[in-house]
Image (cartoon, rainbow, N blue to C red):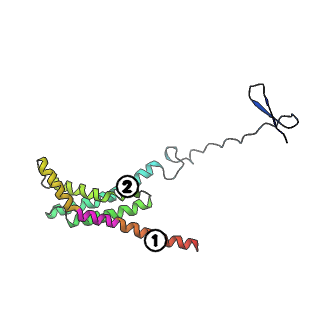
Amino acid sequence: MQEQQTWAAGGGPSRRGAHGAPYPPREWPAAPEPASPEAVGPRGSRRAGSAPARRGARGAVAVALVVPPLLGAAVDSVIGSGPGWTMAAGATLGAAWSTVLAARRHALWWVVPLPPLVVFAVTAGAGLLGGGSAGAKTLATSMVRWAVAGFPAMAAAECAVLAVLALRGIGGLGRGRRGNG
């Protein structure tokens, strides 16, 4: 069939069939009905994992990462030593715990690099509170000393993150094979 275009009275093209008869007008589908207020989630979100819920999940991961090393450093300060094995154990536990929580929430991108920074911050804070120095030169020297003293805890915490990721990866391989069989 041949189709011709002619100019309609309104200035735009109008479609006509092979014999000059106009095509029937196009019918557009009706717009969907708006959702009822009960179907819409908090703040108008239709997703179950809305932004406030995701922020709360990030907060739980951050608490799991920061609180155990802080408690360990507090125990070490009560014992009378600087940040030591208790802080290292807390950092390792916190890193593993936060990695498990973050993997469930797909937030590993910011959790994996943080344990060494958290350990350094806790070690430096404990050093400053436990007998900080006044001079800038002395403070710089103290910070280097705290970084060196905190390195075993940093390494243990990062190894805990890698171990959790490896165990989740190995577990994921087994689940993938069962589904394909």
Q: Is residue 122 above or below residue 37?
A: below
Left or right position of 173 against 31: left
Residue 8 visible in the shown view: yes
* Quadrant showing the C terminus: bottom right
Element marked by disc 1? helix
Q: Residue at x 18, y 58 (%)?
A: 146
- The secondary structure making up most of the magenta span is helix
| Picture disc at residue 171 | 1
- Residue underneath mark 2: 110
Q: CA distance from mark 2 to mark 1?
A: 22 Å
Q: Position of residue 159 (x, y in %)?
A: 32, 67
Kind of residue at disc 2: Trp
Q: Quadrant of residue 11?
A: top right
Q: Quadrant of residue 5?
A: top right
Q: Residues within 10 Å of mark 1 (few under 14, many from 20)?
A: few
Q: Nearer the viewer, residue 15 or 106?
A: 15
Q: Residues within 10 Å of mark 2 (few under 14, many from 20)?
A: few
Q: Position of residue 160 (x, y in %)?
A: 33, 67
Q: Residue at x 79, y 36 (%)?
A: 25
**Which stretch is magenta?**
151-160
